[in-house]
Every structure is written in C-alpha cells, then in structure tokens.
C-alpha cells in the first residue's frame, strides 16, 4: 500500500521522478521519501547523489528513482547523469484526460462492445472480488485466447498483468548474463530494459530505414555465438510495419539454424493479418499477447504469455501471479474476446479512415512524411526530421496548446527519435480530425518561434 501511495503522491509532488520499492512495513519511510522528493524537485540532481540521499535518509529499500514518466518499475541504471526536473506531459494529460485526444500510447478509445461494461458490472455486483480468482484464470479465458491466436494444441497459456509482465517473466526466466537478444531500434524499449536487467544485451538493429523492419539478412549479420533470442514485434511499434509470411518463415529458419528462441510479441496482431512464428517454429517461440490495445482495456492491465510446455515450465518459477490476476480484468477480457469477430472489423475500418485523415494533414506540411503507410496497426511514425522541429517541443505544443497527446520519437529510439513523432490513431474520427487540424498549425508555430 505504502508503495502505491508513494508513487501516486510523488507523481503530484514531482512529476518527473517516481519511487520504487518502498519498504511496506515502514510507514515513516513514506514521509521521509516525500521530503526527499521535494528536495529533488527543488534541485537538478544527479543519480549518484539521489542514491546518496536515499542512504543518508535511511531509505535503502527505495532502490531506484526513475526519470520515466510512467515508469512502474522501468528504470535505467545508466541514468547517472543530470536529469532536469520538468513538468510531466503525462500528469497534465491524465489531469485533463476528458478533454484531450489521447494518441500517445497505442490504446484504443473507440468503444468496441457494451458487453465488456456489462461483464465488469456483473462481476462487481456479484462481488467476485471477494475471492482470489482461480489460479489458471476464469473458466474459458485461456481457451478463448488459445483459439483466437490459433496456438499449437500443446501450448500453455498464463494470464499476466499485461503483455509487459509476460515479457518480464520470460526475460527473467530465459535470459542469462551475457546473452544477446536481437531487437530493433526503434522499438518498444521497456522490453530492452527487461533484457538488460536479466543480464542480457539487446542488440539493436537500426530499422529506421527501408523496409522499416528487420530483414532476415540483417538478423543473420547480427548473430554471434552469444545470441540467444530474437525479439520480433509484429506489427512493429512504432513504425506500423508487419512481416510477410516469407519473411517469418525465413526468420524461423534462422532461429532453427542457430538454435535461437523467438519472442513473438503479438501485441498489435489483431490490427493486422499476422503470420505468427509459432506456425513455423513452435518449439522455440514464446508469445506475449494483450487485451490493452484492440479491446480498449489498457487500464485493466491484463495480457497473456503462451509457450510450449517445456518453455512454460522454465518460466513458471518466475510467475508472480500464483494468485492469478485481477478478476474484473479477466471478466472484461473474456467478454471482449468471445465476441471479437463482431467488433474488430468495424474497428479496423475506422483505423484505416483515421490514417487517411492524418495522412492528408501530414502531406500538407513541407518536410514531413510517413515512413510506413498504410500502417498495419493502430499507430505510425511521422517523420518531421526536415522541419527542424524537435519532437519533444512538438509533443508539448500539441498537448498544451491543442489538446492532442502524441509521443515524441525519443521515447522509442535514442538514435532516430529526434526525427519523428509516434501517433496512435485508434481514437474517434473527431479525434483524428483534431490532430489533422492541429499538426500543421503546431509545426508552423514551432518553426516561427525558431524551436
Ligand atoms: C510491443 C509492445 N509489447 C508490449 C506492450 C505492453 O502492453 P500491455 O502491458 O499493455 O499489455 C506494449 C505496449 O505499448 C507494446 O507496444
């Protein structure tokens, strides 16, 4: 409890820093932690000095302070540099969430089906939350996931707190010190962080270039005797590229040749027509799936890990959910999945329309282009490199002046992030139009101000 309160409170006191792992027994630590946060707020402070302060204040159980806005436990030990305290776009966006168009996290805000609300309300009315859920999840949910993904018959499914916990469990269990994992840059970086904290090294292949995704050839070139795994995000966050059947087959062959595991991150697969690796390399694939994006259940925090029995057995000791995951989330996910065929086509149609609206706007601005169009998922990157505008400034201007929340490319790529923004378009059509109207104006404004 103390930990949760601390995070919530710290985010209002000091938006840019978050506490992790506060000792739950020591209530007084909380008070001292807040004092420390105030101190940090007043000063630009280095990471070693933060750690020094933690020790001096006898707060050894607060292990890290992170500069990531929505960090949870995502911290980067390399942050031993000066981190200026700046207002958090996320705190602002959350405070004004009713009024802004939320295009920053690839979530879906287009209502999909009222059966979800009804299932949640029924579970509340029945006070299902009084009991721990069944450890394998509510009857039928894992089965519906397995059927929907068309998993190999022997695959085991484990429910998790979002796909992010699935990748945490699998990286913890299967990566050992010195292992290399072939990844992309740009990418969904929290998984790279998970690889690092397990002692592994994400080998980031630059894909901010044609064909805007991994190629079998680049993968081959990156393989060393230490390579253990390939992280395949398909479709790829943030670019919106998807892999062809032939590419997937070849990637699976490479995995076979070099005895590699594959993380098949199918977070965005429902927006695409995927060719999962478990069709071609069932013995060496581990799948992470989520209900956050397509079903619009990001706030529920529910996802799944799936793998063949031998790999699942290796991962189970790292399963933190021996008492299962949130019952309301399970009910919501189950309700959504049971009727997915009735709502998914309309959602995908709207996404195509929203992309078109945004493309017209992007095309009207000199120096901007869409590396990938149409995107095969619910987001894409907009290249602004030639405008001279910084994506952080564009993110802030769109948010604070126009009420549209997008993401600076720097969140998904240290190297290429300065050249693009990432925009999720699973918002209402009015939302997409609001972005389309604001984007040229924001760029013009920033160009004029010389930013
Ligand atoms: C590629 C990828 N994997 C995993 C996740 C985590 O999703 P969640 O934890 O909401 O299920 C995300 C979220 O943005 C993602 O983009």
Image: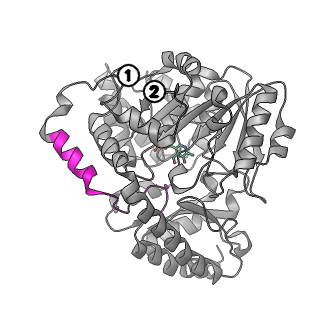
Vertical relation: 353 (above or below) 50: below
Q: Which residue is drawn at 20% across and 32% down?
A: 129
- Residue farthest to the left? 125
Magenta region: 102-124
The tally of labels here is 2
The image quadrant of residue 128 is top left
Most foreground residue, 45 or 188: 188
Most foreground residue, 437 or 357: 357
Q: Which residue is drawn at 53% across and 35% down?
A: 151
Most foreground residue, 393 or 183: 183
Asked if labels 2 and 1 touch by Cβ distance under 8 angstroms, the answer is: yes
Q: Earlier in the sequence, mark 1 or mark 2?
A: 1
Kindly identify which residue carries mark 2. Answer: 62
Tell me if 132 is positioned left or right of 290 in this view.
left
Kindly identify which residue carries mark 1. Answer: 23
Most foreground residue, 285 or 388: 285
């Amino acid at each position: 409890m103390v930990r949760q309160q601390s995070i919530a409170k710290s985010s209002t006191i000091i938006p840019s820093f978050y506490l992790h792992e506060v000792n739950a027994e020591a209530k007084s630590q909380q008070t001292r932690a807040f004092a420390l946060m105030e101190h940090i707020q007043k000063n630009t402070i280095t990471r070693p000095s933060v750690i020094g302060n933690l020790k001096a204040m006898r707060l050894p159980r607060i292990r890290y302070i992170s500069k990531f806005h929505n960090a949870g436990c995502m911290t980067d030990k390399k942050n031993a540099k000066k981190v200026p305290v700046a207002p958090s776009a996320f705190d602002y966006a959350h405070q004004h969430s009713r009024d802004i168009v939320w295009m920053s996290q690839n979530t879906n805000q287009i209502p999909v089906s009222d059966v979800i609300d009804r299932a949640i309300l029924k579970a509340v009315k029945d006070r299902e939350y009084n009991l721990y859920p069944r450890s394998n999840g509510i009857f039928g949910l894992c089965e519906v996931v397995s059927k929907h993904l068309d998993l190999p018959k022997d695959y085991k499914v484990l429910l998790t707190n979002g796909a992010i916990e699935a990748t945490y469990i699998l990286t913890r269990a299967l990566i050992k010190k010195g292992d290399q994992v072939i990844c992309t840059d740009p990418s969904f970086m929290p998984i790279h962080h998970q690889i690092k904290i397990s002692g592994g090294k994400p080998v980031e292949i630059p894909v901010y270039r044609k064909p805007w995704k991994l190629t079998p050839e680049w993968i081959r070139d990156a393989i060393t005797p230490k390579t253990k795994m390939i992280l395949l995000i398909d479709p790829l966050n943030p670019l919106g590229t998807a892999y062809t059947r032939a590419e997937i087959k070849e990637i699976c062959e490479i995995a076979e040749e070099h005895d590699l595991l594959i993380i098949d991150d199918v977070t965005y697969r429902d927006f695409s027509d995927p060719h999962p690796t478990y069709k071609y390399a069932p013995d060496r694939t581990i799948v992470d799936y989520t209900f956050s994006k397509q079903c619009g259940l990001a706030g529920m925090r529910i996802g799944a890990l799936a793998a063949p029995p031998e790999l699942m057995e290796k991962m189970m000791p790292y399963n933190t959910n021996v008492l299962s995951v949130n019952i309301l989330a399970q009910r919501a996910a189950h309700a959504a999945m049971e009727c997915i065929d009735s709502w998914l086509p309309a959602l995908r149609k709207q996404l195509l329309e929203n992309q078109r609206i945004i493309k017209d706007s992007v095309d009207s601005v000199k120096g901007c282009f869409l590396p990938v169009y149409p995107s095969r998922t619910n987001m894409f990157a907009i290249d602004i490199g030639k405008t001279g505008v910084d994506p952080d400034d564009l993110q802030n201007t769109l948010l604070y002046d126009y009420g549209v929340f997008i993401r600076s490319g720097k969140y998904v790529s240290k190297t290429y992030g300065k050249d693009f923004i990432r925009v999720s378009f699973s918002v209402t059509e009015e939302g997409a139009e609001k972005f389309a109207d604001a984007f040229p104006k924001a760029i013009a404004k920033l160009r004029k101000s010389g930013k």
